[in-house]
Image (cartoon, rainbow, N blue to C red):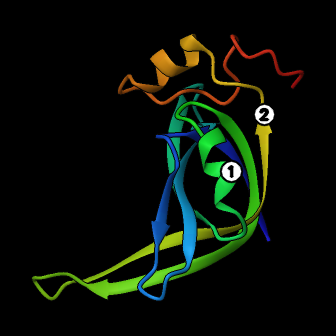
Amino acid sequence: MQTIIGRLTANATIKETKDGRKLVAFTIAQNDRFKVKGSDEVKQVTNYFNCAYWIATGIAEHLKKGLLVEVTGRIGVNAWKNMDGDAKASLTLHVQHIQLHGKVSAAQTEKATTAEPVAANDKEDDLPF
């Protein structure tokens, strides 16, 4: 099981498979900061996680862009060939548990629409950690 904490990059959507099953699809951005070895330079890297929640679609209305969420699930691999015949792959987190952390404020929504990633430890959050 993998646990990821990050902000939603867009409102969640409900998708339907060919066999009629429904899932909630969303993407989480997670910022990682680290110091470069032998330097005082701090680098920031943003990782994006595609998520699929198969348990209940009612949660989708609460998963709004900019919301801080904690998700736990198992990682799955998708592999395919594109139109040029090149091999492609992506990872999807098949979510089994979602925990919402707070509400999306107008300030968070505005920040989420900018090109810059939103830091998970943003000072404007009212979270205790």
Which of the 4 image quarters holds residue 34?
top right
Residue type (three-letter) at the residue carrying disc 1:
Ile
Mark 1 or mark 2, earlier in chain: 1
Q: Relative to 73, is 92 on the left or the right? A: left
Residue drawn at x 74%, y 54% as measured from the top left: 71
Q: Please state the total of marks drawn on the protein image.
A: 2
Which residue lies under the disc numbered 1?
59
Residue drawn at x 55%, y 72% as measured from the top left: 22
Which residue lies under the disc numbered 2?
101
Residue drawn at x 57%, y 19% as measured from the top left: 108
Which of the 4 image quarters holds residue 82?
bottom left
Q: Relative to 94, is 42 on the left or the right? A: left
Look at the picture and state if 58 lies above or below 116: below
Q: CA distance from mark 1 to mark 2?
A: 14 Å
Secondary structure beneath label 1: helix
Q: Position of residue 57 (x, y in %)?
A: 64, 60
Q: Position of residue 116 (x, y in %)?
A: 41, 26
